[in-house]
Image: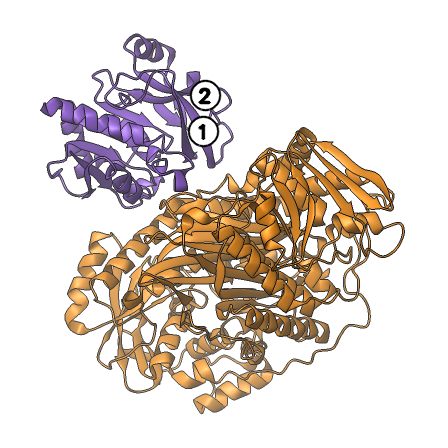
Chain colours: A orange, B purple
Amino acid sequence: MPETATLPTVDDALALGLTRDEYELVCDKQGRPPNQVELAMYSLLWSEHCAYKHSRKLLRTLPTDGPHVVMGPGENAGAVDVGGGLVCAFKVESHNHPSAVEPFQGAATGVGGILRDIFAIGARPIAVLDSLRFGEPSGARARYLLDGAVSGIAHYGNSIGVPTVGGEVYFEAPYEQNCLVNAMALGLATRERLVRSAATGPGNLIVLFGASTGRDGIGGASVLASAELGGDGEQDRRPTVQVGDPFEEKKLLECSLELLDRRLLVSLQDLGAAGLTSSASEMASKGEVGIDLDVARVPLREPGMEPFEIMVSESQERMLCVVEPQNVEEVMGVCEKWEVGGAAIGTVTDSGRMRVLRDGELVGDMPVRALVDECPLYDLRPEKPAEALYRPGLATVAPDASAGEALLALLSCANLASRRPLFERYDSIVQSRTVRRPQEADAAVLALPDGSALAVSIDCNGRRVAADPYRGTIAAVLECAANLACVGAEPLGTTNNLNFGNPEKPHIAWQLSESVRGLGEACRALDAPIVGGNVSLYNEGATGPIYPTPVIGMVGRMPDARDCAQLGFARAGDEIALVGPFTPSLAASELSKLRGEPLPDGLPEIDLAAAAAAHAVVRDAVRDGELSSAHDIAEGGLAVALAECCVAGGLGATVELAQGDAPGEADAVATALFGEGSGGFVVSGAPEALSGLSAFVSLRRLGTVGGERLAIEVVDGARRTALELTLVDLSAAYSEGLAEFFA
Amino acid sequence: MKFGVLQFPGSCDEVDAVEAARNVGDAELIWHRDRDLRGAEAIIVPGGFSYGDYLRAGAIARFSPAMESVIAFARDGGLVLGICNGFQVLCEAHLLPGALLPNVNLRFTSRQVELDVVRGDTAFTRACAAGQRLSIPAKHSWGRYYADEATRRAMDESGQVVLRYAPGHNFNGSVDDIAAVRNDAGNVFGLMPHPEHAVDELIGGSADGLSIFESMRLAVEGTHA
């Protein structure tokens, strides 16, 4: 084989992110030292981002099978059966490091990437949700990243005609340097239209279509995504971030779906991290074939690109497909119709080798198995940290603050305040399916053609996971399922994005393995198998790791779209009840954060079975139309949940709480009002309807809906007014909390 | 009664418009490169980002082959409804007076807005009553309607302002709260809010947008009679 001038050295391999041992192994697999093209390709495919080398063993423990699962992990996205001959494809993916370096393009291309995953399996994208984490918004960097990321998501999602129907955002100091931008997308397809990515049929052609290939995004998967963020090298890393063009993607989307409608493709794959290198190699690996690619046939944005640059470029809005030779002309015709570039750049072979050519001259030759499947996997060395990893923040609420002051502080704090300033930046209604828009209910609801509906939620409270990776992750899964129950939907499947620090460090390995253990248990208990997901590691910088953040996305279904509930109180005179096995605790709660308290070591035990049973009762009651409203109790506890029901419905409430089993003198009232935990719902409805529920689930009557204020009395022998606030004051606190950051 | 809905590369709300129009008649898509309007009796230029809108919203779309036919169709008195990006395209094509500028908040903003019907006797509002209030969602970055004072005076005299944002609902900063305008002849109409997203209470929160499509049906079937 002709070599480039000089062979790269082991130092070049180290600079590309490989270890010394991995470089030796590459030499073994090749039977010689790799040349520049080969080393570039190995370094990407053997990166954490592509090979999951620190997480793959753990991920194998997760439940991935279930009666609704049509496509599990391993394809571009997972898919579940939603009835009526339709499947829902969905997946969440991160674009954390690109967003930390350049938030607008990082977030925009994160949306673009997850949408391509959805239409790569033949589904039309119907919704986007996003999960964002930034430092405290008092800091200039957090506000810069927030504004850039939200603008990027809006720019891409709005322009491509896919509604952003939900999402979540938290502000915590550990995300200050390393923000998180996770995007989830859902798609719909008929079951027979689904397409896989395995390349098959030696002699078939490989067609690259979409945007041309440039020098953007070189080394994104290895240098950027699989290493910690440095203190001041960020500007140098900007060229590793891709630049997105939603118009190009919109055409690419329509073009891909038309190609599939006409049954012109054998298989389809998007180009994401590691560009042509990973998409072609993975297609070959899945089909157990070889592929020859000629880089001279790749349409380029600029002249003089080296073969390795073409192979690793992460230029956006490109797809790769396998086409039978007699169909190529028709494929090009469809590309022309949508004004999308297309070129046959290679062929499927039976060699089992990934061969890269330039004008017919061989410039790289690697066994597909070695590239894709033989990256060494590493065992984690988990060790529970002896000392706290995270420092408490500054206190903003005094321990002796009145209950009313605490409630207003909670409602206006960045983590709980109304998300309307963000949601208003997004088109949530295009495609005419959105039954519940953001903040109208706990989950987004999307109508299906047969009158049923999908519900979807994304969630994770990283602070709770930091306090207890195992139970915190269970709580995140339960939160998603509770959100679905509130609109009347049962879970069909789950996706997840595991955002963690450097897994080579024992304390991070411990967070990761404990979290995955909780994830598996919770998904099993809820019959919500994991159909796909993503892992984002090395999320740490000079100031330490992020909170461990296993973002959970869950998709559910309900038989009749018209039955879904809302979160706001709906009718004066309705009775209010607390439903479910709710045991409030201030441990790792929002109030304890505002008080500047350190994270506890561990969270109270969670009764998964009891929580799942409560979900089922709430879900059925919603479907039967027995409830006027349903809202799960999350951050800020019962008092915040009640306040949210009041504000969303424009109705007050009069509530009486037994102090119950809250321990301790001073904090007993605060725990009853603001304590957090899984399994609790605030529901409202006619008194008879609530009586009916109490036969099936623990139910405590709290009071009645009506009036212009929220009044909560606490009864502990004597009767005391804990707080009384007008709707106007509650709404003002709630609506102004985030607005100032978007002024 | 048949509606034709234009489809440009980058259109986003064209299928929504087809479905909405089907509540009152037939509807089909017309590809931007086609000059043949296929017997459509009314044209909808839909929302989205035609050709990416990188130059200026609607600036490229107005030159498309399909738009050439729509311009001729409009000159012959055919009914043309422009929604959001379609409104921008119709202004760029000078089928409607005025122009659309970036929102005063300089951001894409999505909000359910209320609109006051100024005139209930146009081809696009005859199913409404003057003074009626419509609840319809709006979502755009470039929705601030502007026309100079002389143009506005002329528009007022010939009754070309058809809908105004209700007090507190003019988030984009449109001059004189103007939400929808028609041409002098009365057969071309544009608005930034999306009536096609308010045709089903379950999904739109209101079905007030239906009255726009129903008005067009009445206007067309009236000419047949």
Residue type (three-letter) at the residue carrying disc 1: Val
* Residue A13 in view, yes or no: yes
Q: Judge whether A390 appears above or below A570 on screen.
A: below
Indicate the chain on which mark 1 is placed. Answer: B
The residue that mark 2 highlights is: B166
- Look at the numbered discs 1 and 2 and tell me whether their residues touch, using CB distance below 8 Å: yes
- Does dot 1 land on a helix, a strand or a loop? strand
| Residue A537 location (% of width, % of height) | 60, 68
Rendered location of residue A310, percent (x, y)? 38, 67
Quadrant hosting residue A84? bottom left
Residue position for label 1: B113
Amino acid type indicated by mark 2: Ala
Q: Which mark is residue B212?
A: none
Q: Nearer the viewer, residue B27 or A297?
A: B27
Q: Is residue A481 visible?
A: no
Marks 1 and 2 belong to one chain? yes
